[in-house]
Image: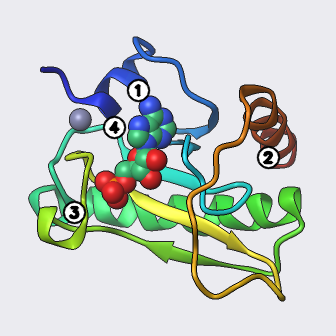
């Protein structure tokens, strides 16, 4: 079966894209724990961070550094959690390296819970973020 995130990069499966460069692709998580929850992935397939190149690891973090402020501004967050589930034992479900950027508001509960926004809400969030990134 083709990799889900490779299919998203190829445009074979739709996504709420917020950023793309030569090496990195970023899009909204469809089960966000907070508004603006974004997945940042390398364009070159690797099952996890350690299976990929150091170059891609650097590009990923560089993209996080670049886009996280725009995400925070777009959704009115005060900070963010940066996460990675590395390996099945750590809760990795999709076997293509990805960082989670999870925006945080000051008084939000400490524990994150998955939410189920509508398609329209996800479209609106992605648009807000893209407007700031561009
Ligand atoms: P992980 O458990 O770290 O592998 O996280 C995988 C994440 O991918 C989960 O937070 C899912 O909500 C998210 N996800 C799964 N399918 C899609 C999809 N088609 N588009 C966007 N996010 C997805
Ligand atoms: Zn892949």
| Residue placed under numbered mark 3 in the picture | 49
| Residue placed under numbered mark 4 in the picture | 43
Q: Which residue lies most toward the top here?
A: 12
Earlier in the chain: of badge 1 and badge 4, it is 1
Earlier in the chain: of badge 2 and badge 3, it is 3
Cβ of mark 3 under 8 Å from ligand 1: the answer is: no
Residue 13 lies, in percent from the top left, at 43, 17
Against 22, residue 91 (above or below) is: below
Q: Give the spatial CA distance, label 1 vs label 4.
A: 7 Å
- Which of 71/54 is in front? 71
Identify the disc placed on residue 129.
2
The colour scheme used to paint the residues is rainbow
Against 8, residue 125 (above or below) is: below
Residue found 63% across the figure and 88% down from its top: 110
Q: Give the spatial CA distance, label 4 vs label 3.
A: 13 Å
Picture quadrant where residue 1 is located: top left
Against 49, residue 82 (above or below) is: below
Q: Residue 22: in sight, yes or no?
A: no
Q: Specify the quarter for ligand 2.
A: top left
Identify the disc placed on residue 9.
1
């Amino acid at each position: 079966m083709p990799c889900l995130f490779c299919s998203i990069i190829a445009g074979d499966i739709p996504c709420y894209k917020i950023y793309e460069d030569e090496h990195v692709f970023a899009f909204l998580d469809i089960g966000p724990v907070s508004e603006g929850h974004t997945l940042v992935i390398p364009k070159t397939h690797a099952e996890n961070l350690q299976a990929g190149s150091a170059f891609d690891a650097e590009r990923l973090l560089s993209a996080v550094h670049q886009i996280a402020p725009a995400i925070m501004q777009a959704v009115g967050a005060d900070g963010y959690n940066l996460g990675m589930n590395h390996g099945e034992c750590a809760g990795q479900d999709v076997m293509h390296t990805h960082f989670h950027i999870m925006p945080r508001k000051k008084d939000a509960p400490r524990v994150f819970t998955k939410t189920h926004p509508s398609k329209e809400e996800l479209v609106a969030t992605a648009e807000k973020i893209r407007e700031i990134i561009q």
